[in-house]
Amino acid sequence: MKALVFDQPGIENLKVAELKTPKPEKGQVLIKVKMAGVNPIDALVVTVIPANPMPHIPGGEFAGTVEEIGDGVTSLKVGDRVTVYSRMFDGNCDMCLSGRENLCRTGSILSIASNGGFAEYVALDEANCVKIGNEISWEMAASLPIAALTSYHALNQAGLGSGENFVAFGASGNTGLFALQFAKERGATVIAVTRKGWAGEYGADYVVQTDAVQKEIARITSNRMSDVVLNSLGESLWKDSCSVLGTDGRLVCFGVLTGKNVPLDLGSLYAKQWKFIGATGGTRDEFVELVANASRYKIRVWKKFGLYDGAQAILALRSKERDGRIMIEFPD
Ligand SMILES: NC(=O)c1ccc[n+]([C@@H]2O[C@H](COP(=O)([O-])OP(=O)(O)OC[C@H]3O[C@@H](n4cnc5c(N)ncnc54)[C@H](OP(=O)(O)O)[C@@H]3O)[C@@H](O)[C@H]2O)c1
Ligand SMILES: [Zn+2]
């Protein structure tokens, strides 16, 4: 099979190689990959996160069809369309047994501790594959494992409720676009902080530019400010995100795209009873629920690349012209 691989860190080291197609082991299926989403984690895996095995295939988010079934697989058959639950978990620890596979004590992330989906085929445990209906596009199927699930879980963790104000920083990004849609569905007033004008098409009631965040949100909310703030960008918008967090506000974070060292005003923390919530990935149950409801959501794809342009696809994440998702598409 053809796969995008690197043998030492660096996007310049990515190349398409001919590798042996994996054989599904007991309890596994072989997936023929149709579409993969490109995310910041893929850039990190290729550059800084220690990955296993080496040489390594990145690609944390993908979907495809079942090509072959290993012994003991009962819930899937050849030809099924599947998307992947991208957390690796043992199923035995206290976290897994309480339905929190994303926090598995021995767990990891598909594409870090295993080869990922920027390849024609991936062998994967049955428990990591979730069947998806024909009505769901491959672009959506390949956006559910990371982009959608992470925001879904984050809003569950923050307990965003109907009638509350929700502010999303990084609202035009992979995760941000889903956060807007989930927040709208939960009955919140949705405020997108973004340089892109089209966030309104994805559930934002208001779109705020990054240069006047506090003033604009004070005006929109009549000074109540936000009940839940999503900041997965970290440093660059940290002050802004705290400046719009209201009384009893929850700030939820699952990423630090622009840096992780931030100041914290403990005075406001106690006086306003702020809660800072970390979130990562999502649970398997949340993923199954999300897959079942996937037809309710939309995505915006900017560009689709072929496997041979995989390095450009990853570099394009930080392109000034970027205007939506970046995908890697595999021909039939
Ligand atoms: N823990 C987890 O499970 C998990 C899962 C997914 C993602 N993450 C992390 O969450 C973060 C966001 O991921 P994502 O996939 O949504 O990222 P993304 O698609 O690249 O979106 C980031 C958005 O942030 C805005 N932005 C503002 N300042 C920026 C800056 N200085 N550099 C780049 N973008 C900037 C941009 O929107 P505007 O142009 O509209 O302002 C951009 O669309 C990343 O750090 C990622 O690693 C974590
Ligand atoms: Zn576990």
Image: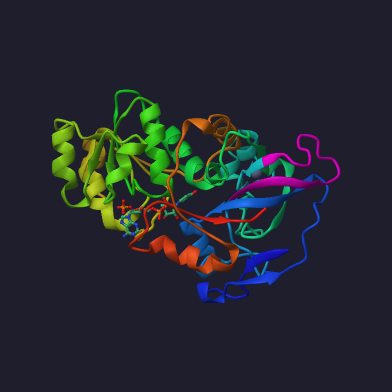
* Most distant residue in the front direction: 332
| Residue visible at 78% across and 65% down in the picture | 20
Q: Residue 48's x, y, as percent?
A: 50, 68
Closer to the camera in the image, 308 or 205: 308
Q: Is residue 19 left or right of residue 35?
A: right
Question: How many numbered discs, if any?
Answer: 0
Let me know if residue 265 appears in the view.
no
| Residue visible at 68% across and 71% down in the picture | 17
Let me know if residue 117 appears in the view.
yes
Q: Residue 297's x, y, as percent?
A: 46, 34
Work out whether 196 lies above or below 220. below
Q: Is residue 24 left or right of residue 225?
A: right
Q: Residue 132's x, y, as percent?
A: 63, 36
Q: Which residues are magenta?
A: 62-81
Work out whether 99 lies above or below 109. above
The answer to if 195 sits in the magenta stretch is: no
